[in-house]
Image: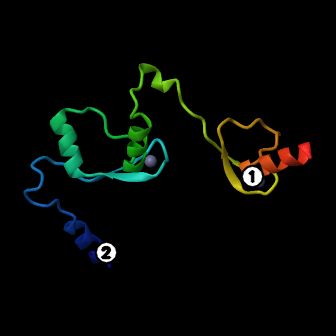
Amino acid sequence: MLVWGVSLFKLRTPQKGATSMEFQDKVLTCIDCGSTFLFTAGEQLFFHDKQFKNEPKRCKACKSKRVSTFAAPASANEHRFQRVETRAICSQCGKETTVPFRPTQGRPVLCRQCFSQRKTAATA
Ligand SMILES: [Zn+2]
Ligand SMILES: [Zn+2]
């Protein structure tokens, strides 16, 4: 029977009084970390109030990260300064690591640990 689905659907009616407009919680995808986050009806109302045209693009965690990163007076060329953090697998120990550059195809990527190990081994 499909009765259950129907009754559950009916339960999802918006709360009375909270919002006069037809705002409903929305699930958005963060452009930074790719995870989904909730754009609540209250926030949408706030955005509408402020006449913001764009929906938030980042989750709260990434937003606060950004704020702290650009707490120092940032110039207009902030967009050009974009750190590339690429996920890679260390070719020596197989651990996942991030490198501040785009690894070249075919070239082995080493995590910090293996990199320093190799360095000391080479000099020894
Ligand atoms: Zn995020
Ligand atoms: Zn390693």
Residue 51's label in the rendered image is none
Q: Count residues near mark 2 (Cα–Cα under 10 Å), then give few for <14, some for 14-19, many for 20+.
A: few
User: Looking at the picture, how far across and down is residue 86, in whole percent?
Assistant: 64, 42
Q: How is the image coloured?
A: rainbow
Answer yes or no: do the residues labelled 1 and 2 have beta carbons within 8 Å? no
User: Would residue 33 be found to the left or right of residue 94 on screen?
Assistant: left
Above or below, 58 against 37 in this view is above
CA gap, disc 1 and disc 2? 57 Å
Q: Which residue is mark 1?
A: 113
| Residue at the outermost top position | 76
Q: Count residues near mark 1 (Cα–Cα under 10 Å), then give few for <14, some for 14-19, many for 20+.
A: few
Viewer-proximal residue, 16 or 65?
65
Q: Give the residue at x 72% y 57%.
A: 95
User: Looking at the picture, how far across and down is residue 124, in whole percent?
Assistant: 92, 47
Q: Give the residue at x 16% y 48%.
A: 22
Mark 1 against mark 2, which lies toward the viewer? 1
Q: Give the residue at x 67% y 35%.
A: 101
Disc 1 residue type (three-letter)? Gln
Quadrant location of the N terminus in the rendered image:
bottom left
Viewer-proximal residue, 108 or 69?
69
User: Would residue 24 be found to the left or right of residue 15 on screen?
Assistant: right
User: Looking at the picture, how far across and down is residue 78, in whole percent?
Assistant: 46, 25
Return the disc, 1 or 2, that comes first in the chain's sequence. Answer: 2
User: Would residue 20 be found to the left or right of residue 110 on screen?
Assistant: left
Tell whether circle 1 marks a residue whose Cβ is less than 8 angstroms from ligand 2.
Answer: yes
| Residue at the outermost bottom position | 1
Q: Give the residue at x 20% y 69%.
A: 11
User: Looking at the picture, how far across and down is residue 47, in whole percent?
Assistant: 22, 39
Disc 2 residue type (three-letter)? Leu
Residue 2's label in the rendered image is 2
